[in-house]
Image (tube, helix red, strand yellow):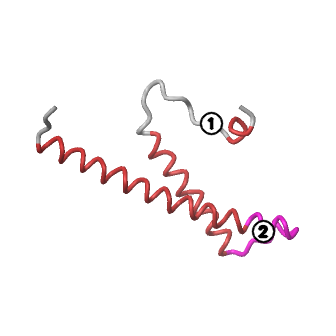
Amino acid sequence: MSHTDQEFEDLQDLNILYRSAILDTTEAVGWGIEILTKVVAAINAGTAGSLSPDAQYQAKQTLMYLKGRKDDNAMFRKPGDPVPRTFQQYEHP
């Protein structure tokens, strides 16, 4: 099977796009882990309602970013793809 230079270029562009999306998502997952670690530490210390203003801001910003990424990722879904599971569905299939 022979491929044209344009096909290889298109695949390379697509690869760059996917790689960028993966790197962005990985970064956001890191923010989520960071803030959830702070929340769990506060829960374990019995001070769940006392996150610092900086941690509260980080939580809000991280949540907004993750919601945006979720919406961005949804455009790659195809008809027939399963609906994303909720946490409850994941825990209790």
> In the figure, is residue 29 to the left or right of 3?
right
Which of the numbered marks, if any, corresponds to residue 35? Answer: none
The image quarter in which residue 53 lies: bottom right
> In the figure, is residue 91 to the left or right of 49?
left
Q: Amino acid at mark 2?
A: Ala
**Up/down of 90 relative to 15, above or below:** above
- Which residue extends farthest top? 80
Task: Inspect the magenta stretch and tell me whether residue 80 lies in it.
Answer: no
Q: Quadrant of the N terminus?
A: top left
Query: How packed is label 1: few (under 14 Cα within 10 Å), some, or many (20 or more)?
Result: few
Q: Nearer the viewer, residue 62 or 8?
A: 8
- Residue 15: % across, % down: 31, 49
Name the residue: 24% across, 45% down.
11
The image quarter in which residue 16 lies: bottom left
* Secondary structure under the numbered disc 2 in the rendered image: helix
Residue bearing the label numbered 2: 41
Task: Tell me the distance, in whole angstroms, between the alpha carbons under discs 2 and 1.
Answer: 27 Å
Span highlighted in magenta in the image: 39-53
Residue bearing the label numbered 1: 85
- Residue 21: % across, % down: 41, 53
Name the residue: 18% across, 48% down.
9
Q: Contact, CB < 8 Å: mark 2 with mark 1?
A: no
- Which residue extends farthest right? 46
Query: How packed is label 2: few (under 14 Cα within 10 Å), some, or many (20 or more)?
Result: some
Name the residue: 44% across, 46% down.
72
Q: Amino acid at mark 1?
A: Arg
- Residue 28: % across, % down: 53, 60
